[in-house]
Image (cartoon, rainbow, N blue to C red):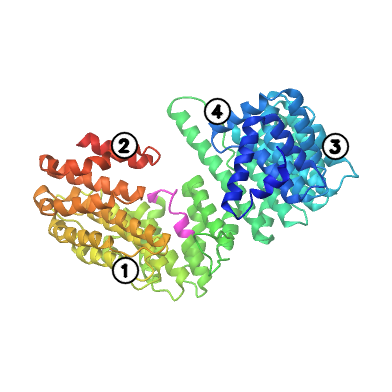
Amino acid sequence: MADLTQTLLACQSPDPATRSAAEQALTQAESTNLPQFFLALATELSSEGKDVNTRQLAGLHLKNLISAKSDALREERAARWTQISSAERASIKSLLISALLSMDGTARHTAAQACAEVAAVELPFTEWPEFLPALMENVSKAENADGVKISSLECLGFTCELLAVQGHDIAQDVTNQMLTTIVDGIRADRPETIRLAAAIALRNSLLFTAKNMENVNERNMIMQTICEATQSADVKVRAAAYECIVTIAFQYYDKLAAYMQTLFNLTFETIRKDEETVALQAIEFWNTLCEEEMEILDEVAEAAENGEQPERTCANYVTSALEHLIPLLSEQLTKQEEDADVEEEWNISMASATCLNLVANTVEDAIIPVIMPFVQGNIQNENWRLREAATMAFGSVLEGPSAEVIGTYVNQSIAVLLTALADPHAMVKDTSAWTLGRICDLHVRSIPHESFPSLVTGLMNILLTETPRVSSQACFALHNLAAAFALDENDNGTNALSQYMPMLLQTLLQVTEREGWDECNLRMGAYEAVNVLIQHAAPDCKPLFIQLLPVILERLTQSFSLPVLTNEDRDAKEGLQGLLCGVVQVLCIKMDKESVMPYADTIMQNTLQVLQSKSAAAHEEALLATGALADQLLADFEKYLAHLQPFILQGLRNYEAYQVCQVAVGLFGDL
């Protein structure tokens, strides 16, 4: 094309007309002569005299001519690339390799991305034999600038990442060359910036090193290199080294035995003393061991049931470390961050709780005698950090151990946890409510009968008075408590929840409109608790539901007049309508035809209006509510079919929102 530099710059113009014309010019150049377009972009990227912005734009455009998010489009673009003649491709690739030597860091980094895209297409088919030797020379050549070595290692890391995502295998000699280059870059005498790029490249390459890991000498070299990198002076290098260790634990669990004592010492020291970003990766190593051992133990159990020999053996690393690992994690639980956003921030305390949960699921009953002294010794400590940590520890180990082993502790904990709902510190209240929710979910049969009234009222009393986070945990607990009545026979027409139902439903509906309803998924949690309470209510609650249905319908009717000034307003409005349709659905299912019939017109008017919105989630709930009404009315539903038909057809066509489409198919079948 006439002037690629100016065209690329015009693509960044604030003027829509200028930008559109430039984009059309690039598209035209691509379709007219693709090889020449690739060559022009590579030339622009590799030209030292050019403006760095246009060099970067050229490189990214070249990269995007090959890359794609969907597998089908990527394969199509890869095929298009390979159809270019070998000579033309060689010229383009030569320019890309030369750009890795650029004096400008942005150009080098962009060249690393573009080279990786091409290499990911060609290496699986043993094309581009010059690629890895060029990178090896860039990294090992003493006179090359550090930036060149970093960009070359980045390129190698990007390439491995792309090959892994695409599921390609590569020849062993290619892997060997990669490892040689990476190990040269990660040496202890290298600058930390080079070691970091090498460590990231190593992490991305480990998927392809199976044969190297089978060789004892090569495996020792890899492990020694990584373990040395965990002692780097640079925090980023240490974190990247632990990411490699995590990947090895996942990919090569059966090769860890010779290194476990070293890894035990390294990870424990790091968790205790290193900066949080590194310590989190060290904890992730133990998380990965737990996940691997759980999977192996499941395989062993399944093989035993089938009278077969298991393919893998569990080394029980987690069980062996239990006496030391649990006190270490318990200590980390006390490093809470009071102002941390649970939704967005991840810290050492949260990570330790997650690890405890995984350990409990791995070793099951064996964790109880190790963790309970910490729990019992600190759950009522004067120091709030110890109180919260002990409560979190107990909540984290509820899943895994059997009811026979943990049931006694659950029984004893209810009164303590209910008292803690009034703790002066918000985090203690939050964690106590969460733990009660976990007990209601996992060990409801261990709750003493005499504690049931105080449990229900204790949770109900904090719904409106505590912070949105604590209130949300109380909703979670009530949701799980109600779900425990799913198998209740109701032989006498009632159950233990019946006497509390009026006040529970009234309070939860107030929660959906309280201050802070839009925080911590509080509104959704409250409505979901309402739904589960209705679903598992005893027959004696029927009069209550007859009163509740018009209240819900009135809320749904009023929701259509809510003001919408921002996208957040629209999302909140449509979210509310979806939640209200969900309540309508469970009420229609729970009530009989005689009770629902007087409200059928109002239900249909509202659900049809919801179906006119653009929210797929609201559509799904509206269709489900309509289906529940149709199940009750049977032939009497026929008068609504003409009004409903366009929306069913719309749902059937909406295959991209597959859940809506699925519900539409189900509703169509029912009708």
Q: Mark 2 or 4, which is nearer the eye?
A: 2
> Where is residue 519, by image quadrant?
bottom left
Q: Earlier in the sequence, mark 4 or mark 3?
A: 3
- Residue 382 lies in magenta, yes or no? no
First to last magenta residue range: 393-404
Q: Are marks 2 and 4 in contact (CB under 8 Å)?
A: no
Q: Mark 3 or 2, which is nearer the eye?
A: 2
Task: Determine which of the numbered discs, if any, sits on residue 458 in the image.
Answer: 1
Quadrant housing the N terminus: top right
Q: Is residue 472 above or below residue 75?
A: below
**Residue hosting label 3:** 137
- In this view, the residue farthest toward the left is 594
> Where is residue 436, by image quadrant?
bottom left
Mark 2 vs mark 4, CA separation in Å = 45 Å
How crowded pointer 4 is (Cα within 10 Å; few <14, some 14-19, many 20+) is rated as few
Residue 273 pos. (x, y %): 68, 61
Q: Mark 2 or 1, which is nearer the eye?
A: 2
Residue in the image at 77% along x and 24% along y:
87
Q: Secondary structure at mark 1?
A: helix
Q: Earlier in the sequence, mark 2 or mark 1?
A: 1
The reply, left or right, for residue 127 in relation to residue 558 is right
The reply, left or right, for residue 658 in relation to residue 256 is left
Q: Are marks 3 and 2 in contact (CB under 8 Å)?
A: no
- Camera-nearest residue between 146 and 459: 146
How crowded pointer 2 is (Cα within 10 Å; few <14, some 14-19, many 20+) is rated as some
Residue in the image at 55% along x and 45% along y:
290
Residue 279 pos. (x, y %): 65, 56
**Residue hosting label 4:** 311
Q: Earlier in the sequence, mark 1 or mark 3?
A: 3
- Camera-nearest residue between 2 and 327: 2
Q: Secondary structure at mark 4?
A: loop
Question: Which amino acid, mark 1?
Answer: Gly
